[in-house]
């Protein structure tokens, strides 16, 4: 009995080895009891379980050996179950032991599946975060380098000196090469994952922006019309940026205004509208960040294949509307 219980100390490290030790002990006791009954007595009919370590061993084999082949996990448990059946004239003990082993097996399988799902969800979250960061890097760097390329092209056309024109053309060429390499690198980061921001997910959740705005003193009403449609990662991030920048401008220029954020899905496109009424100069709001200027925001929207319109409203407020294509 001690030989079968002592290995439980190593159940997490070597669950199958411990299970086979228990199985061997469970088989050896009835056999030795038949050969030398005076030296090895059978367990009494009133014993709670036989072998005492069987439920723990069965649980360990299922919970801690999940990376092994199913047959290698089940074999020692089945041997223990067969050894219990060899006990003569002890039906109550056999029934208790087999029931305890069955319950331990089911709980061990549940723990194994739960831990595997938890690990897969953690890996999936890490993968999506990596793709999101790659997309953000692509958007920001592409935006800046694209402006450098455009300015270099303008400089090359306007320069009267051949040396200056050649230098500007070299800058433009190197910028184009950098853009191609950046796109290639981001594509490699996203390849083979099977999921991510650029594989047709809906728009990002805008509720965190609404919560933060209300916390800073500008309540926002959010509405979504139509069934959500998948969009590219660039569209999703740009739409989020449009709402974020529009709310920052409301904080800076129209404190105390009523703000509405509307998302409307239509066939082939999605429209994001941020409208606010006139503000109250004496209203309290938290200090807003620098935000993004409307010209820069328009460039980001156009880079994502969308259009941006903005201007004052009849009630003295302001509106910002962006329309993007859906995938």
Image (cartoon, rainbow, N blue to C red):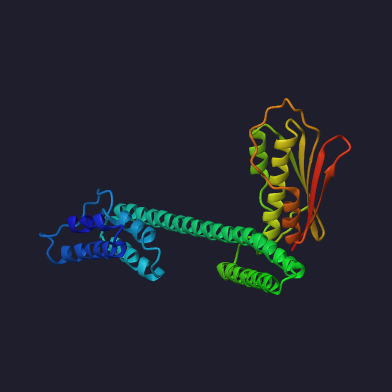
* Residue at the image point whose x is 18% and y is 55% from the top: 2
Nearest to the observer: residue 63 or residue 281:
281
Horizontal and vertical percent position of residue 195: 60, 64
Q: Quadrant of residue 129?
A: bottom right
Nearest to the observer: residue 4 or residue 309:
309
Q: Considering only vertical position in the picture, is 90 above or below 72? A: above
Q: Is residue 186 left or right of residue 228?
A: left
Nearest to the observer: residue 253 or residue 220:
253
* Residue at the image point whose x is 36% and y is 56% from the top: 59
Q: Considering only vertical position in the picture, is 246 above or below 88? A: above
Q: Quadrant of the N terminus?
A: bottom left
Residue at the limit of the structure toward the front, as seen here? 161
Residue at the limit of the structure toward the left, as seen here? 38
Q: Quadrant of residue 323?
A: bottom right
Residue at the limit of the structure toward the right, as seen here? 314
Horizontal and vertical percent position of residue 318: 81, 40
Horizontal and vertical percent position of residue 293: 72, 47
Nearest to the observer: residue 239 or residue 25:
239
């Amino acid at each position: 009995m001690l030989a079968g219980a002592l290995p439980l100390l190593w159940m997490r490290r070597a669950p199958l080895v411990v299970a086979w030790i228990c199985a061997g002990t469970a088989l050896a006791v009835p056999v030795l009891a038949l050969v030398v009954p005076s030296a090895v007595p059978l367990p009494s009919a009133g014993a709670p379980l036989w072998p005492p370590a069987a439920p723990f061993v069965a649980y360990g084999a299922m919970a801690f050996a999940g990376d092994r082949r199913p047959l290698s996990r089940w074999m020692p448990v089945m041997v223990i179950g067969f050894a219990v059946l060899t006990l003569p004239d002890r039906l109550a003990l056999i029934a208790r032991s087999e029931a305890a082993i069955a319950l331990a097996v089911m709980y061990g399988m549940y723990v194994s599946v739960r831990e595997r799902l938890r690990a897969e969800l953690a890996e999936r979250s890490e993968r999506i975060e990596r793709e999101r960061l790659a997309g953000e890097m692509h958007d920001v760097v592409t935006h800046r380098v694209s402006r450098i390329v455009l300015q270099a092209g303008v400089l090359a056309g306007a320069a009267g000196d051949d040396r200056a024109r050649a230098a500007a053309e070299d800058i433009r060429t190197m910028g184009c090469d950098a853009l191609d390499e950046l796109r290639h690198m981001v594509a490699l980061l996203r390849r083979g994952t099977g999921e991510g921001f650029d594989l047709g997910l809906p728009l990002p959740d805008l509720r965190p922006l609404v919560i933060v705005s209300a916390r800073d003193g500008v309540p926002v009403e959010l509405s979504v019309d139509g069934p959500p449609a998948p969009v590219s990662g660039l569209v999703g991030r740009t739409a989020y940026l449009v709402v974020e920048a529009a709310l920052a401008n409301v904080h800076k220029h129209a404190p105390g205004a009523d703000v509405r954020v509307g998302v409307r899905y239509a066939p082939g496109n999605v429209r994001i509208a941020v409208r606010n009424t006139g503000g109250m100069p004496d209203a309290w709001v938290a200090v807003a960040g620098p935000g993004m200027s409307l010209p820069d925001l328009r460039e980001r929207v156009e880079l994502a294949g969308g259009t941006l319109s903005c201007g004052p409203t009849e009630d003295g407020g302001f509106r910002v509307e962006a329309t993007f294509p859906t995938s």
